[in-house]
Amino acid sequence: MHHFAYRNGTLYAEDVDLTALAGEVQTPFYVYSTATLERHYMVLEEAFKGLDHMICYSAKANSNIAVLKTLGAKGAGVDIVSLGELLRAQAAGIPGERIVFSGVGKTRDEMTAALNAGIYCFNVESQAELEALSSVATEMNMTAPVALRINPDVDAKTHHKISTGRAEDKFGIPWGDASLLYAQAATLPGIQVTGIDMHIGSQITQLGPYEQAFAKLGKLVSTLRAEGHEITHVDLGGGLGIPYNNDDELPPHPEEYANTIKNLVSHLECKILIEPGRMIAGNAGILVTKVLYVKPGDTKSFLIVDAAMNDLARPTLYDAHHEIMPVTEQAETADKITADIVGPICETGDFLAKNRQVPELAQGEMIAIMSAGAYGAVLSNTYNSRLLVPEVLVNGDQWALIRPRQTYETMLGAEALADWQD
C-alpha cells in the first residue's frame, strides 16, 4: 500500500498536489511519503509483536537523513555498510545500540568510528576482517561485539545481481568454515561473539528460500552452542520483496514472513534482528518527470523525458519494471500508444520503461515512475554531467525539500585543475 492517488484528476502524494509541487521544485524530482514509510515499518513491528526483536532498516535502500529520522522516530534501528551511512544514522539521531554494521570491506577507520559509536554489532564476513577488527579493538582497548555472517548456499530465487546467499556470491563465510572461525573468534583479543548473521538476497517473493535458510541457521546455532559459544542474537537479514508490476506474483505478507521466523527460529530463544529496506521504502517513493519530446518511430514511439538512467538506474541495471502513472489522470478510453520512456543520456541503455502501453501524452505533461523509493536516489549519479535531482518528503499537506537540486557550481567546484594547468 502507498499514499499516492488521484484527486480531482491530479496525482497527489498524501495531501500534496504533485502538479503544484512540480511548479515549486521543477522536474525531475523524487518524492517520499511519510505515511507510507511509517505504515510499512509499523506493519512489520506488529508482525513481530511478542518476539524479542529489533528491526534495523537497511540504509542502503534509501539513506536520506530525513527518511532515517522518520523511521528512527518510530523506533527503527539501522543496518549500515559504510562510514557514510554511520554518519547519516548519527545525524538522524539513531543511537549506536540500534546500529549494526554489515558489508564485506570494512576499513580500519570505519571499524574505529563504529566502535566509538558503540554500535550493537559488527556482522563480520571473513577471517581477514575478523583479525583486523580484533587488532583495531585491541589498540583502542575496547571489545567489539561480533556476529559472523554465514553463507548458507541457498538460492533466493531473485535477480542474480541481488542474490547474496549462494556459495558463488562474495558475501559471508562458507558454511563449512563456520565452526572453525567461531573457534578462532573465541580466542581473539578485543572480540566478543554475540550472535550469528545470514542474508540471502533482495526482492525475494517466495517463503521457500527463507524456510531453507532459517532451518539451516537453527541447526548451526545448536551446533555452535554445543561447541561452547554463546549465541544471544540471530540476524536474519532482509530481502522481502515488493510488487513492482501488477502482473507479478505478490510477495508474502510481512505477517507470513514473521510466522516463518517464529516457527523456525523462536525456539532458539535469541533476540531476532531483521534488516528490511525495500519493503519499507520501495513503494514510499516516486520519481516525477516531464515529457520533453514525443518521437514517433516505425514500430513504437519514444517518450523522451527529463529524467534518465543516472536518476533511476534500476531499469538499466536490473531490467527492472516500474509502473507508470500520468500525473494528470487519463480516461480509461484515452488513446494508447506503445512507447519506450527514455531519457536524454547518450546511451541506448538509457530507459525507464520499454514497450509500454501508455496514454498518448503530449510535450510538457508529467508522469510518475512508481515504487522508486528504494535504490532510486541512492544509486543516482552525475553521468553526462547531469545534476543530482531534488528529494522531497511529504507529511499530510506539508512538504519539505530534503535534498535540493545540485547546482553546476557545486558540481564543478568538486574538481580542480592540475597545478601546471592553472
Image (tube, rainbow, N blue to C red):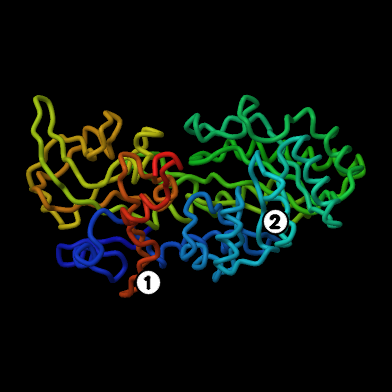
Tell me which residue sits at (84%, 39%) in the image: 182
**Could you tell me which secondary element the residue under label 1 belongs to?**
strand
Q: Is residue 330 left or right of residue 152?
A: left
Instruction: Give the quadrant of the N terminus.
Output: bottom left
Mark 2 highlights which residue?
Answer: 114
Q: Amino acid at mark 2?
A: Ala
Dot 1 crowding, Cα within 10 Å, few <14, some 14–19, many 20+: some
Q: Is residue 276 left or right of residue 323?
A: right
Tell me which residue sits at (85%, 38%) in the image: 223
Mark 1 highlights which residue?
Answer: 395
Which is more toward the observer, 245 or 355? 355
Q: Amino acid at mark 1?
A: Asn
Instruction: Give the percent coordinates (x, y) of residue 226.
Output: 90, 41
Tell me which residue sits at (42%, 50%) in the image: 414
Instruction: Give the percent coordinates (x, y) of residue 153.
Output: 66, 29
Which is more toward the observer, 325 or 143? 143
Q: Is residue 291 left or right of residue 315?
A: left
